[in-house]
Image: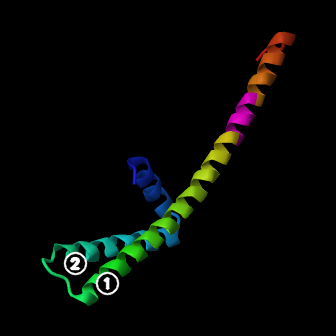
Amino acid sequence: MERAEHILIELVMKEDAKLRRLYKEHEELESELLELQRRAFLTDNERLLVRDIKYRKLRGKEQIMRIIDEHRKRIDLNRARVNGVQSHVSSVDSLESAMGVPP
């Protein structure tokens, strides 16, 4: 993940319990995976466990990214609304100035 995504995740986690849970689970799975990958030899069961952990991490990351994308869309929508209001205010100011209306 990019740095900007990490920052957004940290901000959203403050208010989104599901994201906090998914992120914690993702970190725990990463820790388990690293421990298994440090071993010189894996049993068949351990190799299956590695595959399962990778699968669960991927599914969790997909869910995390969906939540982040939803928040990003809300931010973009709010930004568009603010820009629209600012544009409208600027147009009104220009019109009033053209009409000689004092600020």
Label the magenta part by its dominant secondary structure.
Answer: helix
What stretch of residues is rendered in magenta?
81-87
Q: Which of 44 and 25 is in front in this view?
A: 44
Inspect this view and state whether residue 21 appears: yes
- Residue 3, position as x, y percentages in the image: 38, 48
Task: Write down the residue under mark 1.
Answer: 49
Does residue 35 appear to the left or right of 23 in the view shown?
A: left
Check the image and report above or below for 97 versus 78. above
Task: Write down the residue under mark 2.
Answer: 36
Q: What element carries label 2?
A: helix
Residue in view at x 23 percent, y 72 percent: 34
| C-alpha distance separating marks 2 and 1 | 9 Å
The crowd level at tag 2 (other Cα within 10 Å; few <14, some 14-19, many 20+) is some
The crowd level at tag 1 (other Cα within 10 Å; few <14, some 14-19, many 20+) is some
The quadrant of the image that shows the N terminus is: bottom left
The reply to whether the C-beta atoms of the residues labelled 2 and 1 are less than 8 Å apart is: yes
**Amino acid type for the residue under numbered disc 1:** Leu
